[in-house]
Amino acid sequence: MSKEITLDEVQINFKAKVLRVDPTSKTRRRIMDMGIVRGTEILVSGKAPMGDPIELQLRGYNLSLRKKEARDIIVELL
């Protein structure tokens, strides 16, 4: 099994697969409503100069998340 990391730690142009969303997250429902659920493959396509926000590609669309929200998403690198 690969090492578990949070989505904000994934480098640009790397893919990751969602393992889970932190159950204690205040934005968990909103994150899951955007299609970020277990098994989803995500490509980190860019980051702002200070690392916030993070640009993602998943399920055929682009999405920007704050670093704080990305910390609640546990992934493994592909």
Image: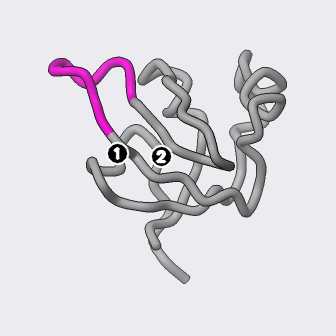
Task: Determine whether 61 is above or below 48 in the image.
Answer: below
Q: What residue appears at the point 71 percent right and 51 percent down from the top-left corner? A: 20
Residue 34 horizontal side relative to residue 42, left or right: right
Q: Amino acid at mark 1?
A: Glu
Looking at the image, residue 53 lies above or below residue 33: above
As drawn, the label of residue 61 is none
Q: Does dot 1 land on a helix, a strand or a loop?
A: helix
From the image, which quarter does the N terminus lie in?
A: bottom right
Which residue lies most toward the front here?
Answer: 60
Left or right, 7 with reference to 19: left
Give the labeled residue for mark 2: 6
Q: Secondary structure at mark 2?
A: strand
Determine which quarter of the picture holds residue 17: bottom right
Q: CA distance from mark 2 to mark 1?
A: 6 Å
**Taking 14 as reference, is 75 left or right?**
right
| Magenta range | 46-54
For the residue pair 22 and 62, the one nearer the viewer reads as 62
